[in-house]
Amino acid sequence: MSSLLEVRSLHTLYGDSHVLHGVSFDIKKGQAVSLMGRNGMGKTTTLKSILGVLTPRSGQVRFQDQDLDGLPTWQRMRRDIAYVPEGRGMFHNLTVKEHLLMAARPNQRREVLWDYDRVLATFPRLQERLGNLGTQLSGGEQQMLAIGRALMTNPDLLILDEATEGLAPLIRKEIWEVIRTIKASGVSTLIVDKNIQVLEKICDHHIVLVKGRVVFEGNSQQLLEQRDEVESHLGV
Amino acid sequence: MFTNRAEKLFVWMFFPLALLMPLLLDQNTFYVNKLATILILSIFVMSLDYLVGRCGLVTLGHALFYGLGGYLFVMLTPEYEAVNFWVYTFYVLVIASAIALVVGFIVLRTSGIYMIMITLALAQMCFYFFSDSTEFGGNDGVFIYVKPETSVFGLNLFDLDNPTHFYYLCLLSLFNCLLFFKLIMRSKFGRIVDAVQENPERTTALGYNVFQFRLASYVIASALGAYAGYLFALQYGFVNPSMLSWQTSGTALVMSILGGLGTLYGAILGTLVYEGLHYGFEHLTEHWLLPMGTLIILMVLAFRHGLAGYLESLLGKRK
């Protein structure tokens, strides 16, 4: 399987504070990858470095065999990367329908695999709330809308930052089910979360960050074998 | 098109009434002219309202384009020859858009207070340029001796010298302007503009170049601001640097806030009320600015979302 995303030796700093110390990993086509770590270990910084929100001091990010270095965030996203930010990122002045329609576009190959109808079929709850403003939805519905909006861009890679943070257990279950559906559709996913029990079942590959360094990288079998060590890194 | 109840009510009341006004006023030239000025100002305020209220781009230099609209017409036309209104409208819109593209490219690199300062500085530079220019009449401005003719394929549609005809041209322009902005806001472009105003970083993360959307909006608003200035120049037959002054921008901003920022139809409401108060107090006392200023402060405090917001809350439909 060829690599979709290649992250090589990322060193990112906030002012004088060195946050990422040579982070490297790959995401292959159709693969679901988890990025785990305690708070402040560099997960969001890694995502921001990939998306170009932060400029790494050194290192390289390649997507579909093309170098993303130097490209602004919006151009990186146009290469068929979609991002669901932590906190869901609703626009308070747009309705559910407007959220979906404003994001709609075909991918770079001019294919429309996820359109308005398919997204609503995947998230039937949103169908009932089309006229509501994004901020008038429950936390779970907001998360569904954020994922639905990202899918409307027909991405090859979907990045989810803290996808189930602050949600009720039943809603979390629903979100995980949706992520399974997305994975089954062939979209690669990079999931930042703390729920190791679910991630080991959903994701094919796992990365654990501690103080900006990759301390574990492996498949679900390897994760199971080193579960105690990984859990100690995660503070579980 | 007009989905909000308050907006629908306003549009259905205002435009039919405005259509009848020349008849109700018995074609009184003074009042018809006065109302035409209010309609022109409404176009100008609406273009600013779109920029400030819908795009989140606060500018104190919008008068730059209002003045340029008038001056461009003077620069382009021969002094004693009646040119075609439609052709010169096109010229003014295209040239104003081109200037807005350059100005926008500079000013949109900044935001917030810095954008206010840079737009103010650019408008004041133009103000002093025309004030000091002997070619453009300095502070006195320039007279337009011959008004354009409005023929299309040899058929003269209306007479710009006729106040009633001119009034209807302004009314049609205002209605088209409102319709145009409503269409924009309902389009995908408008939704992205809304998203940019709400959170530019999030919009960027969806793969949109925020700068391009802001620049496009700036050009649209500036071109319509210039069109308003062009109409003003045609109505009064002269242009002078006061059209470019920061007071013109500031007054338009007050009208927009008074009407309800970002509501678009609120721009008409704000202009009507402001100009009505202006006219009323001016005839009441020599020191009209004091009571008028006090009343505007009280109104802004009382109607937090402007007059349109108050109307919407009365009808229970504020989003």
Image (cartoon, coloured by chain):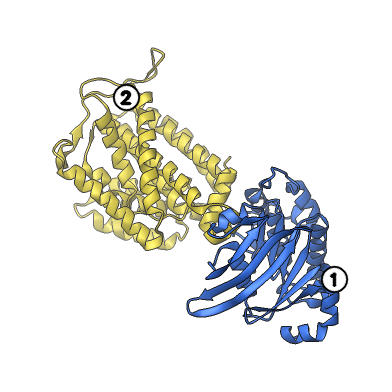
Tell me the residue at 35%/24% (across/down).
Answer: B85
The residue tagged 2 is: B160
Q: Nearer the viewer, residue B244 or A204?
A: A204
Figure quadrant of the N terminus of chain B: top right
> Between residues A157 and B221, which one lies in front from this camera angle?
A157
**Residue, x 33% and y 53% (percent of image)?**
B119
Image coordinates of residue A215 in percent, x first then y, are 71, 80
Q: Nearer the viewer, residue B69 or A148?
A: A148
Identify the chain drawn in blue: A
Mark 1 falls on what kind of element?
Answer: helix
Chain B's shade in the image?
yellow
> Is A126 placed left or right of B29 in the picture?
right
Density class for disc 2 (Cα within 10 Å; few <14, some 14-19, many ≥20) is some
* Quarter occupied by residue B40: top left
Q: Is residue B271 visible?
A: yes
Q: Residue at x 23, y 45 (%)?
A: B242
Is residue B312 placed above or below A83 in the rendered structure? above
> Which mark, by number, is residue B96?
none
Q: Residue at x 46, y 53 (%)?
A: B53
Q: Which mark is residue A201?
A: 1
Type of amino acid at the residue the image marks with label 2:
Leu
